[in-house]
Image: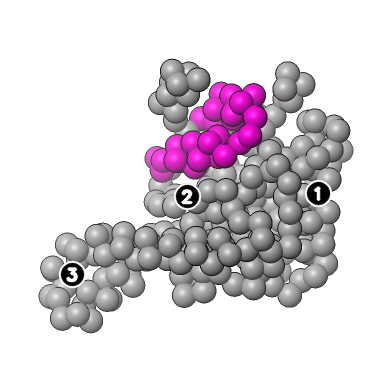
Amino acid sequence: MKKIERFRILVMGRANAGKTTILQRVCSSTENPEIFDGKGNKMPHRLVEIDIDAECSQRGVHKIEHELVFRSNLGLVFHDSGGFEAGSTRQFDEMSKFVVYHGATTRVNERIHAIWFCIPMTDYHRTVTAAEQKFFNECDTGHVPVIVLLTKVDALYLPALRGLLDEGLAIAEAKERAAEKQGELLEKWLDHIKQELGKCQFPPKGYVSLQKMHQESADCSALMQCTANVLNEEGLQRLLISTQQSSIALCVQYAVHK
């Protein structure tokens, strides 16, 4: 454990799942990450400015081997699988090979320690697609835990408001109750996702709902705590908790209990 210098996370999910924003919040940054190839060489500046959630025209610029690092927190290293969609056998095979190698390599500083799988609530009507089914049924991540992140939860506000208006509520009352209804919708879809992925051969180890990530003050402590809780090495827990910058309270809590 003393040889491990940085905590390494693979981030997966569909295009436009809000991955970049989450990483910025976790690292307390508003900047784009610096990108390095697998050998530690910094990539050209023009690539750094490209959003890793970009759609088709820029898809493929980022490779899963590339390291994404924010200057504000050099202790966290991220890898991005790109827009993970069904139907791309090549992309799935590349991701599987990456997980198998980096999950068990003897080069301890190249190992990935956790996987964040993002499911955006902008697509709440298709929360578990063939891509998710394929990954959780066919990709054995070994000892590397996978956590499902429900992203862009704020997108459920409008369906919640429309549902209340359809029930006959006046606009003022509907707005007052929209937040509560949004929470009910979130619970509904979270239960559905847990049920569907729970049937898979390699189900996730945890689930986290992320809200208001567009705000610089967004709270990521639940994500960091969930990630720490599913790690099977106390040394890795200690590394993650000491490296994360989203919550001083989390550091204190972990120090007291551990």
Marks 1 and 2, how far apart in space? 24 Å
Amino acid type of disc 1?
Answer: Val
Amino acid type of disc 2?
Answer: Val
Residue 100 — which label?
1
Q: Position of residue 180 (x, y in %)?
A: 24, 60
**Tag 3–tag 1 contact (CB < 8 Å):** no
Marks 2 and 3, how far apart in space? 27 Å
Residue 40 versus residue 116: which sits nearer the camera?
116
Residue that numbered label 2 is attached to: 208
Quarter of the rendering containing residue 93: bottom right
Q: Is residue 214 left or right of residue 142?
A: left
**Residue 205 visible here:** yes
Residue 223 versus residue 246: which sits nearer the camera?
223
Q: Is residue 180 magenta?
A: no
Q: Position of residue 72 (x, y in %)?
A: 58, 31
Q: Is residue 243 left or right of residue 253?
A: right
Question: Looking at the figure, which quarter contains the N terminus?
Answer: top right
* The residue stretch that appears in magenta: 217-245
Q: Is residue 242 left or right of residue 46?
A: left
Amino acid type of disc 3?
Answer: Ala
Q: Position of residue 255 (x, y in %)?
A: 48, 18
**Which element is circle 3 on?**
helix
Q: Is residue 222 magenta?
A: yes
Residue that numbered label 3 is attached to: 174
Quarter of the rendering containing residue 109: top right
Q: Say which residue appears at 55% left-offset and 60% top-offset.
A: 198
User: Which numbered mark, 3 or 1, is in the foreground of this view?
Assistant: 1
Q: Tell me: residue 189, above or below residue 100.
A: below
**Residue 63 visible here:** no
